[in-house]
Image: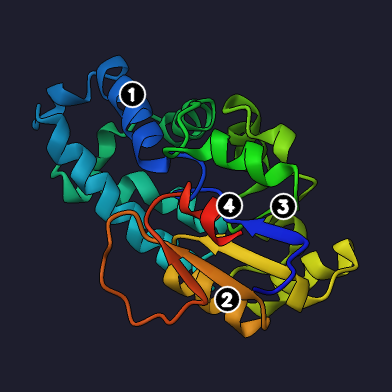
Amino acid sequence: MKKYTHLLFDLDHTLWDYDSNVRDSLTELFTDYNLGSLGNPDFELFFEAFQATNHLLWEQFNKGLIDKDELRAMRFKEVFNRAQLPLSEIPKDLEEQFILRTSSKAKVMDHAFETLDFLKTKYQLHIITNGFNLSQYNKLKSSKLDTYFDLIVTSENSGFRKPDKRIFEHALLHLKAEASHCLMIGDNPLSDIQGAQNAEIDQVYYNPLNTESEVNPTYRIRHLSELIKIL
């Protein structure tokens, strides 16, 4: 076992329960804006349209094909298209409200707090996320995860996006740490695992659904609590 001193965590889907928090905020918005009256009263279809659209847009963002403003401008237009709802009826502040409400949600992944409580006594903990400053800091504060982390690196404050190795090098520079002393923990095989490999940092692939992937990480886990056994 290598002697790690710095643990680098992804945020969304790894510590902060993105899917549950998004579902909760979209449920509120679907009701508050009476979106079911626009021709498709089934929330599940609306949610599925959002999930498919959001996944695609974030893939494009991570690959550098679109930027933050394009992602946010396109998101609900594509959702309404997929859900066969009239684009002319998209509430003007829907995207803004989605960001505000979602980032205020507090649900975290199973075993997040007890695992972080254990690790915080032994390692320096940090965040490396492709999310944007305001929303990511709000998520950390709302969920009470903020007290665990020393350095927060986002795609916005670093100027780079995972899997670009430069976002990891940006963190190492600020930490004055060697790559061999760091371990990246994340759920995304491309941005988190391949990204860390690009920077010669060991990785833990957090894969709670045990989905198939060609990625070859240093470690694999299905539950955050398994980090305690590894470390």
* Figure quadrant of the C terminus: bottom right
Q: Earlier in the sequence, mark 4 or mark 1?
A: 1
Q: Which residue is mark 3?
A: 126
Mark closer to the chain start, 3 or 1:
1
Q: Residue at x 75, y 42 (%)?
A: 121
Residue denoted by label 2: 195
Q: CA distance from mark 2 to mark 3?
A: 16 Å
The extreme top residue here reads 32
Asked whether the viewer can see residue 26, the reply is yes
Estimate how packed mark 1 is, as few (under 14), some (14 to 19) or many (20 or more) residues with alpha carbons within 10 Å.
some
C-alpha span from label 3 to label 4: 14 Å
Residue 217: percent from left, percent from top: 48, 77
Dot 4 corresponds to which residue?
Answer: 131
Rate crowding at label 4 as few (under 14), some (14 to 19) or many (20 or more) other CA atoms within 10 Å: many
Image mark for residue 58 = none
Q: Earlier in the sequence, mark 4 or mark 2?
A: 4
Say whether disc 3 or disc 4 marks the residue closer to the N-terminus.
3
- What is the distance, in whole Å, between disc 4 and disc 2 at their CAs? 15 Å
Q: Are marks 1 and 2 in contact (CB under 8 Å)?
A: no
In the image, is residue 183 above or below residue 180? above
Cβ atoms at labels 4 and 2 below 8 Å apart:
no
- Is label 1 in a helix, a strand or a loop? helix
Figure colour scheme: rainbow
Q: Distance between the Cα atoms at labels 1 and 2?
A: 35 Å
Residue receiving disc 1: 29
Q: Amino acid at mark 3?
A: His
